[in-house]
Amino acid sequence: MGNRVIHKASLAESKSFHEDMVGIIATIILAVGAIFMIFPLIWMISTSLKEEQEVMINTSLIPWNWYWKNYIIAWNAIPFGTYLRNSGFITLMSLIGAIISNSLVAYGFANFKFKGRNIIFLCVLGTMMIPNMVMMIPTYVLFSKINWVGTYLPLIVPAFTGGAYYIFLLRQGFMGIPRSYAEAAKIEGAGELMIFTKICIPLVRPILTTVAVFEFNNKWNEYFNPMLYLNDEKLYTLQLGLRSFRGTAGVEWHKFMAASLIVLLPSLVIYIFLQKYIIKSVAVGGIKG
Amino acid sequence: MKKIKSIISLLLIMAFVMGSVIGCSNAGTKAPADSTGNSEAAATKAPETKAPEGKEDKGPVSLRVWAHWGSEQRRPTIEKIIQSFNEKYADQGITAEYVYVPFNDIETKMIASITAGNTANVVITGVEDLNAKAMRNQATDITGYITGGFEENFYPQFWDMVKWNDKVYSLPFVIETHMVYYNKAMFAAAGINAEEIKTWDDMIAASKKLDETLKGKDNYMLAFYPTLGNFGYNGIAAANGGGIYDTALNPSVPVLTNQANLEAIEHMKVFADMYGKDLVQSVIASDASGAQDLFLSGKVAMIGQSSAYLATIEKYNGGNVDYGVFPYPAGPSATGDHPYTWGDGFVATVPYGAPNLEESVLLAEFLSTEGAAIWGSEQKEFMAAKEANNNANSSIVGWDEVTKMMDYTIVTQDSIYAPNAETNVKNAVDSIVVNFEATDVKATFEQVQQDIMKAIEDEKFIFGQ
């Protein structure tokens, strides 16, 4: 009896030891991975604090002199305030458009039965397969014909027409809500709009947050479309401004990194505060359905 | 319920209509109509434009210039040029506005805007593919708008580079030639007179002497290596009367395996065998920008660089390196009494379909002459307009030698049919003298020659030629 208890205790101890070991190894692997992932950011910070002459010869991450002035120089080198305002406006409008349009379309696909629903949904998903470069010229011509080139409209309006990935993500979320909730609400006299806004939207809030974060990142960091569609530098965005630190003769790394960090900051803060929603919704979108 | 259904239906229909319009809009990508309104004709031949016979009063005209100069160093100069233009033509109601477009994407933006018919009036582009732009209806034939004798402003070879089928498609702006920059103190220590380096053998002998004298001292790594800087195979081949094609401008017949070209790569291989893989690769790895580049930091005694390198030296040297310049000596197959080198440049192109053509050309002319004088003076770069190089910069060491070298500079262009040929050649050269993989020089070049010929044949087949 006593031996059996000792044996059981020893087994439990051994199991606990194994679990601890697995935990330690996993932590080490994740820590190494995290260092790899965060290294470019650290390098950016380090380079942004070095003097121009130091950038290429000081391979250490610690600057010889902490040259904070790079941030002021970078800020003054381009009209940062104007670009910040422009990027902010485009991003905010796109966010509103993406949240409204994608949630409505996704709700329709998830809850309404109509002829050809699956085929239409497949067509929507199919748009993810078309490379952007193939669409570039035709889309440009289209926007040019309706006199939108040189305005923010080609950058904002498409967000109001939905995006395949966001529709897919939200549809999965809506499909996960038991239909009985809606039926109960209907018995209480609620209309479809009320069910959508008061019951379903709060339940998919984590996914909506993710859509908002992704859309924010996309629009905040978008370079190609603003480059293509904007012809007036007063309308330029931060990403276009950043490119002015790169020329034919090379890159002014110290300034480029300082300016990039300023631009990166909002994305970083948003991700840090909302990461739990992002992880949760990616799990929902990836597993269910 | 009905309301929300109709909203959703509307959104779905909108998505479909947008998709369909986008998918079916190749109509917008057809070539713009020619002067007779015949778009089919315009699509099959290069655009032709004629200057209007009488000047009409159009009222105020606003022009747009796209270029890639957005840095603190470049932007003030291009803005100053545009301001000068606006002041000069204020009484005629013509104004221009400068718009910065990032370097790597200016061509993409130009092509999209030409297709949509809302392009800029003047775009600064590289000259290497101007022939392709002319053939593909992306650049306007402005021959009819150029005033007689205007070409006299420019070096002949830099004027020729803006022509395709004897018609003018751009106006030349910034140009580059290539020289060898040498460290006078190192030459003195090794007892070498740069003026006595007249042949390829002299170049190798000088390099050996420098290595013997300076090896192990300070930062010194080696005397000279042809792929360092931006000299490369083109520089050596041009000095031997060679080059990828039989002609420099609008080329289509590759001659990579002729004697001049094989001698050029063999000459480069002499340096490769002399220094070996480890040293060559460690020198390449230790290159940096600004004051830490190979030449200014004293790691090499000579470097092949473009004329724009004079401005780099002015900015970063601070008088530390006493330097001089000389042309890379002529090879055994070269003809003439002076060595040649290669060059390239940026040109002011009027995109096809640009509005206000007459005023657009006026702006391009201003950029390439009066604007060039401002640019050359402030940016310390060499301009295609000869007069623009006579400025205060002539006090810079090497300025006069580089100016003289312009007369011996051959501008090269890509083949319309094989735009990637230069990359193919560079890869082959790197495999011989940088990566030390290929040992049979002739076989390597024969393979590249075949690849280029195949690319040309394939492309000609696509064009139905």
Image (spheres, helix red, strand yellow):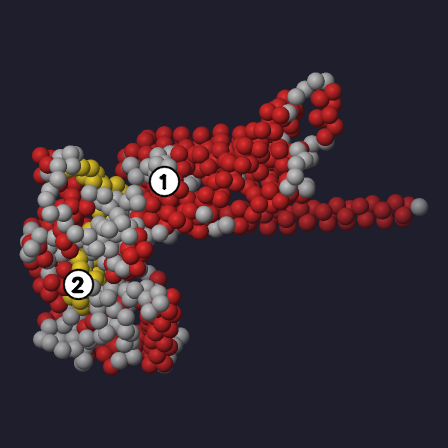
Instruction: Look at 37% across and 47% down and name the residue there.
Output: B28
Could you say where residue B123 lies in the image, as x and y percent from the top left? 24, 48
Q: What label sits on residue A145 in the rendered view?
A: 1
Residue ranking furthest to the right: A1
**Disc sitting over residue B166 in the figure:** 2
| Amino acid at pointer 1 | Lys
Q: Percent position (x, y) of residue A26?
A: 63, 48
Give the chain letter at badge 1. A
The residue at 63%/21% (across/down) is A194
Of residues A9 and A172, the one drawn nearer to the viewer in this rendering: A172
Residue A142: percent from the left, percent from the top?
A: 40, 42
Q: Secondary structure at mark 1?
A: helix
Q: Is residue B206 visible?
A: no
Measure the alpha-carbon separation of dots 1 and 2: 35 Å
Q: Are marks 1 and 2 in contact (CB under 8 Å)?
A: no
Q: Does residue B282 appear to the left or right of B328 in the view shown? A: right
